[in-house]
Image: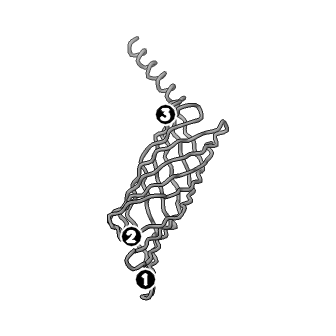
């Protein structure tokens, strides 16, 4: 009987300890992504990217003082301009509803500085394509884009009043309809406020 009581008290103490250290925080997030490099199997195409602003929310689930999970969900505006080198035809790709869902492991190096690392999924819900073919006129169509998978690593600095700034690097690969394979790199700067 005493052993069972001891186990029960130990279980109760562990549960209370975990409940006290586990913390859930939510933050609005704004960010800008700077795409700067890519490779594609189709070497007849060159790419011209624009800045990618995004807005959304971050969720921080703390399991200890050092470790937390930080999933995010943001809407991102994207534009990609691809040019076929042989005839200079341009293809503009615009997505007004691009959802980016990363899940970061957040490890605190100090009280204010953390390392972020994890996978990221990008989903395109309304891709529009505008084709410019010079003398042949132009046409447009709407089509779904394949999901984008990425790995992300970066740093996040949090002030004492829970405002944070993050700097992350991203490497992504996808299979869009204008090339067999595209690997993109980008630098992301973001900010938010956990409450």
- Counting residues from the N terminus, which is met first, the one under dot 2 or under dot 3? 2
State the quadrant of the N terminus.
Answer: top left
Q: Which residue is mark 1?
A: 133
Q: Is residue 194 positioned above or below 91 on the image?
A: above
Residue assigned mark 3: 67
Res. 45 mark = 2
Residue at 48% x, 67% y is 48
Task: Please tell me in which quadrant of the rendered image residue 148 appears.
Answer: bottom left
Image quadrant for the C terminus?
A: top right
Q: Which residue does the image show at 43% across and 45% down from the upper left?
A: 118
Image marks 3 and 1: residues in contact by CB distance under 8 Å: no
56 or 85: nearer the eye? Answer: 85
The x and y percentages for residue 92 are 47, 73
Q: Position of residue 36 (x, y in %)?
A: 48, 58
Residue furthest right as drawn? 161
Of the two numbered discs 2 and 3 in the rendering, the one whose residue sits closer to the viewer:
2
**Residue 142 sits above or below residue 156 on the image:** below
């Amino acid at each position: 009987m005493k052993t069972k009581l001891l186990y029960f008290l130990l279980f109760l103490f562990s549960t209370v300890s975990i409940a006290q250290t586990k913390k859930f925080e939510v933050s609005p997030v704004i960010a800008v992504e700077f795409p700067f490099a890519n490779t594609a199997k189709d070497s007849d195409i060159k790419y011209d990217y624009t800045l990618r602003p995004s807005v959304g929310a971050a969720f921080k689930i703390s399991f200890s003082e050092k470790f937390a999970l930080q999933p995010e969900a943001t809407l991102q505006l994207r534009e990609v301009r691809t040019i076929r080198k042989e005839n200079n035809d341009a293809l503009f790709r615009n997505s007004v509803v691009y959802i980016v869902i990363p899940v970061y492991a957040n490890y605190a190096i100090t009280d204010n500085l953390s390392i972020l690392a994890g996978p990221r999924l990008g989903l395109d819900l309304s891709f529009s394509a505008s084709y410019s073919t010079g003398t042949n006129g132009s046409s447009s169509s709407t089509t779904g884009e394949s999901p984008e998978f990425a790995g992300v690593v970066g740093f996040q600095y949090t002030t004492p009043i829970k405002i944070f700034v993050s700097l992350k690097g991203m490497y992504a690969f996808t299979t869009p309809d204008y090339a067999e394979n595209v690997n993109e790199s980008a630098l992301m700067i973001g900010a938010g406020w956990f409450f």
